[in-house]
Amino acid sequence: MTTFDKLWANGAFRFGAVVLGLVLLMALLAPVLGTVDPAQMDYNNINRSAGFAGNFTLTDGSSVAHHFWLGSDNFGRDLFSRVVYGARVSLVVAACTAAVALLIGVLVGMLAGYFRGADLLLMRFMDGLMAIPAILLAIALVAALGASITTVVIAIAIPEIPRVSRLVRSLVLTLREEPFVEAARALATPTPVILLRHILPNAMAPLLVQGTFVAASAVLTEAILSFLGLGLPANIPTWGNIMAEGRTQFSQYPGNVLYPALFLVPTVLAFNLLGDGLRDVLDPKFAKR
C-alpha cells in the first residue's frame, strides 16, 4: 500500500482533502459562480432574503435578471458572490502565511538545533515572541503597518514562527546525533549540505503537519482581524469583513453573518483534520498506534 493509499484510507485526511478541494474549486471558479461583481452595490436590492429573484443594476445603469442565492447585504451587494470571492482571500492568506512561517521557522530552528552557540540567543527571542498572545501581536502589527494582504500575512505569520522553530529545533537536536549525519561530518561534508540534504528531508513529515495547522490558524485569525476592522480593507470581500458588516443588523438579518460563517467553519475544520490525517500516517509514533 502506497503512502497516498494510507492517507486516503484515513477518514480525517479524506474529509479534509475533499472539503478543501471543494473550497479551492469554488475560489478558482469565483468569476463563474459569482455572477456579479462582489463590490457592486444596488440600493434597489438592500437586505434581500435568500433565494430572492429580481433584477440587479450594473455599474453602467443597465439591469440584468439575477438570483440572490444567499440574499444581499445592507448595501445591496450579492452575498453569494462576496462569500465565493472571500474564499480566494482566505486561501491566499492561509497559503502565504504557512509558507512564510515555515520558511523562517525552519531556518531559525535548524540554526538553533545544529549550532549550539546560536541556540540560546535564538530560542530566547522565540520564547519572547511566544509570551505575547498571537491575536494581540497580530492586531498590533496590522495597526502599526496598515491594512493590506501583505501586512496581514506578516502579522499572522510572525506569531507562528516560534512554534515552527521550536518543532524544527527539537527534530534537528535528535537528527544531528544520527549515524548518517555523523558519517557526513566525518567525510567533511559542508554544513549547508548536511542541513539541506540529510536533516531537512527527515523533518518534512512533521513540517507538513505543522503547515496545515498554521494555515487553519491563519484563516481564523484573518477572519478575526477583519471582523474587528483591523484586517483587509472593507472593499475587499473576506469572510471576516462580510460578518463584520452584517453584525449591526444581526437580529433582523442573521444570514449576513451566518452564511459566511458556514463556509469559514468547515474550511478551518478541514485544515485541522487534514493535519491530523497526515500526522496519523506520516508520524511513526501515531502510525504504530
Image: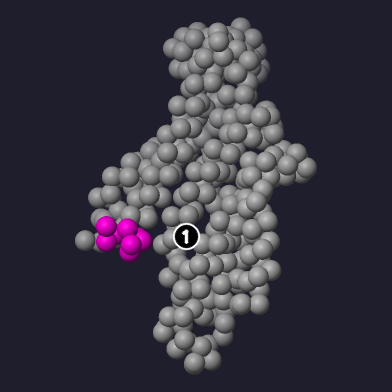
Task: Determine whether the residue tagged by mark 1 lies in a helix, strand or loop.
Answer: helix
Q: Is residue 61 left or right of residue 173?
A: right
Picture quadrant of residue 256: top right
Q: Is residue 80 magenta?
A: no
**Which of the image's four quarters has the N terminus?**
bottom left
As displayed, is residue 49 above or below residue 283? above
- The kind of secondary structure the magenta stretch mainly shows is helix
Please name the residue shown 59% across and 52% down the image.
160
Asked which colour scheme the image uses, the reply is one colour
Residue highlighted by disc 1: 207
Please name the residue shown 28% across and 45% down the image.
11
Extreme-left residue of the structure: 1
Foreground of the two, 268 or 87? 268
Foreground of the two, 252 or 70? 252
**Which of the image's four quarters has the C terminus?**
bottom left
Q: Is residue 253 left or right of residue 119?
A: left
As displayed, is residue 106 above or below residue 265? below
Q: Residue 167: percent from the left, percent from the top?
A: 51, 62
As displayed, is residue 137 above or below residue 284? above
Q: Is residue 283 magenta?
A: yes
Number of residue marks: 1
* Magenta segment boundaries in residue numbering: 282-289
Extreme-right residue of the structure: 144
